[in-house]
Image (tube, coloured by chain):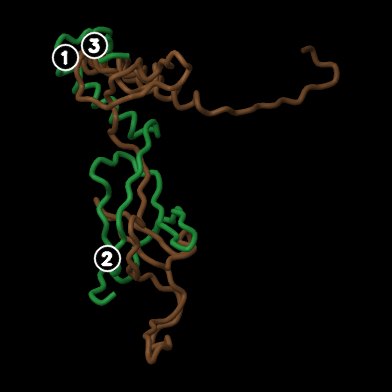
Amino acid sequence: MTVQEIIERAGIKEANLGIAYIKDAIHLIQSQGNDALATWKVDIVDGTRDYPLPANLIKLKSISIKDTNDDKWKKIKRLLSDPTVTEDNSP
Amino acid sequence: MSFNTNNTWVYKISGRNIHLYQYLYSATTDVLAGYSIRIPDAYFGDQLVYPDESITAGLRFEGTAFIESFVNNDPNELTGSNANPTLTEESPTETSHVNLSRMLSLAVVDYLKAQKYEASGNVELKEYYMREFWKKVGDNNSNKIQTGMSYTSTTYSVK
């Protein structure tokens, strides 16, 4: 369905406002379900614990780490509680 | 060399970051004359440590994102040779196609109506169209799931 068709069906007269609402609706749909999945790959650096989530990520589905032994990315588990050590200056 | 990463790595969400740890069941070691030795008095047992190796493209995120939302062709129409359409992302204009299924496109129409009525102060109609929006989003999700149901019937039951 084209942007124009959606805007006309909804009875909205301003195209830019209609496009902004369509973007909001897509965000809501993506945050509720898994309609369009994407993947991002980041380098792991020795001794670095913190890695930013991708800026355009809406809903996280899984995190995987590369097993260099067999060249596969394997899904890892989420920690449910905080570790005792909150920061380590000499990891 | 990382191995069994599904069992030896864990993460924790911390605001906009993740904290990545390796799980070890050992003590702190050091290398002396080519031999890996356990450091005296080092704790032996379960430990969470910072990543102890660099892996190129080693961390993989999977999730939903605002990508290819507006495209040049209708995503719901096959080409003449019954192949999926070739979609190229473009900046949204009135002639762009929204890269959603027909059902989700209809849901978006309901969302726009809800916003229109909210702007005019008609909360009742806004609520009605938001319900319609979520109903269609739910229908779209359940359209991809097939479930089977079976019932027992007695010997002389009317079928």
Is the C-beta separation of discs 1 and 3 under 8 Å? Answer: yes
Secondary structure state at the residue bearing disc 1: helix
Q: Which of marks 3 and 2 is nearer the N terminus?
A: 3
Instruction: Determine which residue is flagged by label 1.
Output: A15
For image coordinates 25% across by 17% down, the residue present is B96
N-terminal of the two: label 2 or label 1?
A: 1
Q: Label 1 sits on what residue type? A: Ala
In the figure, B11 relative to B88: above or below?
A: below
Q: What residue type is labelled 3?
A: Gln
* Quarter occupied by residue B156: top right
Q: How far apart are marks 1 and 3 (CA)?
A: 8 Å
- Label 3's element? helix
Instruction: Where is residue B40? Give x, y as percent.
Output: 39, 91
Residue at numbered disc 2: A48
Q: Residue at x 28, y 14 (%)?
A: A2
Secondary structure category for the residue under label 2: loop
Label 3 belongs to which residue? A4
On-image quarter of the C terminus of chain A: bottom left
Colour displayed for chain A in the image of the structure: green
Mark 1 and mark 2 in contact (Cβ < 8 Å)? no
Taking the image as drawn, is residue A31 in sight?
yes
State the residue at coordinates (42%, 86%). B36
Residues under labels 2 and 1: Cα distance? 46 Å
